[in-house]
Image: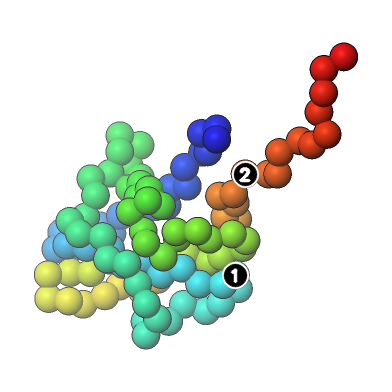
Amino acid sequence: MALVKEIVVRFRQSASADVVANRIRVRPANTSPAYDTPFDEIRPVPTPDQDGFTRIPAANIPQMDGLEGQYDVHVTAVDSRGNESDFLEIDNQLFDLSPPNPPTDGATE
């Protein structure tokens, strides 16, 4: 099987100094964010790249495993006391992690 381009969640981190984690929720497309839905917590907070964006590979987000179709990704910041920020909504993202079917009916002549 050929290498598939990896899905990465990209965002600018909270400017608050006491952020210790990010929570990521993956929901069906066009679904309002909600704090009472399951999340994956990324701890410690990843260091932003040189361009200022934090990048979290889908492989580090168990909820994304095997997803196909349109989804919303909701990201929050969590401080050392457990307070959670408002949502960053990354809406209508296409998850396409399966390869197409192979060609059929081949022969050499």
Q: Would residue 84 be found to the left or right of residue 12 on screen?
A: left
The mark lying in front, picked from 2 and 1, is 2
The quarter of the picture where residue 19 lies is bottom left
The percent position of residue 81, horizontal first and vertical second, equals: 12, 76
- The amino acid type found where label 2 is placed reads Pro
Is residue 55 shown above or below 49? below
Q: Nearer the viewer, residue 80 or 39?
A: 39
Q: Secondary structure at mark 1?
A: loop
Q: Is residue 57 above or below residue 73?
A: above
Is 48 left or right of 95, judged from the image as shown?
A: left
Seen in the picture, residue 55 relative to 33 is either above or below; the reply is above
Residue lying at 41% horizontally and 52% vertically, measured from the top left: 58
Residue at x 32%, y 67% (from the top left corner): 40
Q: Which residue is mark 2?
A: 99
Q: CA distance from mark 2 to mark 1?
A: 22 Å
**What is the count of numbered marks?**
2
Residue at position x 37%, y 77% in the image: 38
Q: Which residue is mark 1?
A: 29
In the image: residue 106, left or right of residue 44: right
At label 1, the amino acid type is Ala
From the viewer's perspective, is residue 5 above or below residue 54?
A: above
Residue 7 spot, x, y in % from top left: 47, 47
10 Å crowding of disc 2: few (<14), some (14-19), many (20+): few
Marks 2 and 1 in Cβ contact (< 8 Å): no
Q: Tell me, yes or no, if residue 88 can be seen here.
A: no
Disc nearer the start of the sequence (2/1): 1
Quadrant of the snapshot with the C terminus: top right
Say what secondary structure mark 2 lies in. loop
Q: What residue appears at the point 62 percent right and 44 percent down from the top-left corner?
A: 99
Q: Quadrant of residue 95?
A: bottom right
